[in-house]
Amino acid sequence: MSNQTATMKIPVKQAGYGQSMAIMGILFFVFGFVTWLNGTLIQFFQIVCELNVSQALLVTMAFYMAYFFLSIPSSFILDKTGFKNGMALGLLVIAVGSLVFIPAANARSFGMFLTGLFIQGAGLSLLQTASNPYASIIGPKESAAKRISIMGICNKGAGALAPLILSSIVLKGASQLEDSIKAAVDVAQKNALLDSLASRVKGPYVVISIILVILAVLLKRSSLPEIDTNQEDAATKASTTGKTSVFQFPHLVLGVLCLFVYVGVEVMAGDVIGSYGKSMGMSLDDTKYFSTFTLVAMLVGYVIGIATIPKIITGQKGLQISAVLGVLFTIAAYFTSGFSAVTFIALLGLANALMWPAIFPMAIDGLGRYTKMGSALLIMAIAGGGILPQIYSGMFNKESMFSFLYNSNMDFRHAFLYCMVPCYLYILFYALVGHKVGKK
């Protein structure tokens, strides 16, 4: 622990580094599991609530926009509660959002489902505002990307399991059920089938709520050490001297935009892959598992990151390579079709894996007493996961909220290309130049 940054203060009798990492790993597993249920929910709500693609993608909008509205309030909450209590509170808020799914399923109300997702996003906003900087600064600065890669394995491992588990429950026999609903002879029969399908979601979310409450209590009673981000070492103090606002750190501001587009492409690769496959004529029984393919590719990327950072490559170099791969895989998906195209979209998970572990530490580097607020701004940028899918659907669907982008000559393949490539090019810019802007 001698190489630990001067920003951390750990009482002697509190949990050590290994135990703290284990607790953080559990938390990252939890919010990975909850987050990556959305890919399955998009397809589920399309049937249950009789939605088109643009309407179903409001799932990501409601979920990720909570980060935009509640990340800065989360930083103020953390100032009052500290990291550990703030994370426990975040788990309880997610549990409340999960319970909203019960009345939503009873009423088969898409609006109520979206409300539950927004509340979940609010809890995750608090949880992530605390957990990401905690994982970044709990150990040596040069291995921050490696630590977050370890957290990423916990997060995306849960994400790979989530669609498999939820799909096996709520979308079991989906294609046959979808045909039965379409063939229903009267409204009453159709509604009975839809109500039966909607009720499938209640059990899983009750279980999720119970587990979250138990984890919140255990976390509250744990020996996880508190970190004082207001303490600054000499180098950090020099970089913050004369600064009166977090917006006076250009590398952070550029990093917020970088994280915004990164989360956008991550969600596109993980949550849109199913509807992309359906647009090519694949059955729901096939497409319901596609999100897992992307998450497995991300897991491979995290393992590569742990093995290579910082021994072989830096986080910055990893981000450069990842951005280039993102461009290449997107172009490859455009020029292919069927399962080949789906494979290249899934491989975007590999390209995306090292992005968060690299961007987050680079963006908060040297913020000192502004770390909590800088982290809050970065967590706000997760809203990109709600915005980019809507921009994508607006390019080929005139019923989208971004219908001003609608082009009758554009199909989903062109829209995917035009959304993704500019994002990856900006990430490459940040890896090469942006992260250094304004630093002494």
Image: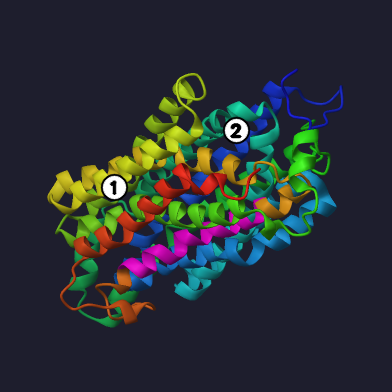
Query: Residue tagged by mark 1?
Result: 327
Q: Is residue 61 above or below residue 147?
A: below
Label tally = 2
Query: Residue tagged by mark 2?
Result: 25
Residue at horizontal 69%, vertical 34%?
137
Disc 2 on helix, strand or loop? helix
Q: Is residue 382 magenta?
A: yes
Decide whether the magenta segment is chiefly helix, strand or loop.
helix
Identify the image quadrant of the C terminus. Answer: top right
Image position, residue 356 (x, y; %) = 50, 43
Q: Residue furthest front?
A: 440
Range of the magenta residues?
375-392
Q: Mark 2: few, some, or many residues within 10 Å (few <14, many ≥20)? A: many
Residue at horizontal 47%, vertical 48%?
430
> In the displayed structure, does residue 308 sit left or right of residue 418?
right
Image position, residue 133 (x, y; %) = 66, 42
Residue at horizontal 23%, vertical 44%?
344
Q: Is residue 142 magenta?
A: no
Numbered badge on residue 393: none
> In the displayed structure, does residue 149 sit left or right of residue 419?
right
Whether residue 7 is visible, yes or no, is no
Image position, residue 370 (x, y; %) = 75, 51
Identify the image quadrant of the N terminus. Answer: top right
Q: Give the amino acid at mark 1.
A: Val
Q: Nearest the camera: 235 or 383?
A: 235
Q: Is residue 39 above or below residue 185?
A: above
Q: Give the amino acid at mark 2.
A: Gly
Image position, residue 281 (x, y; %) = 14, 59
Whether residue 17 is visible, yes or no, is yes
Q: Nearer the viewer, mark 1 or mark 2?
A: 1
Disc 1 on helix, strand or loop? helix
Q: Mark 1: few, some, or many residues within 10 Å (few <14, many ≥20)? A: many
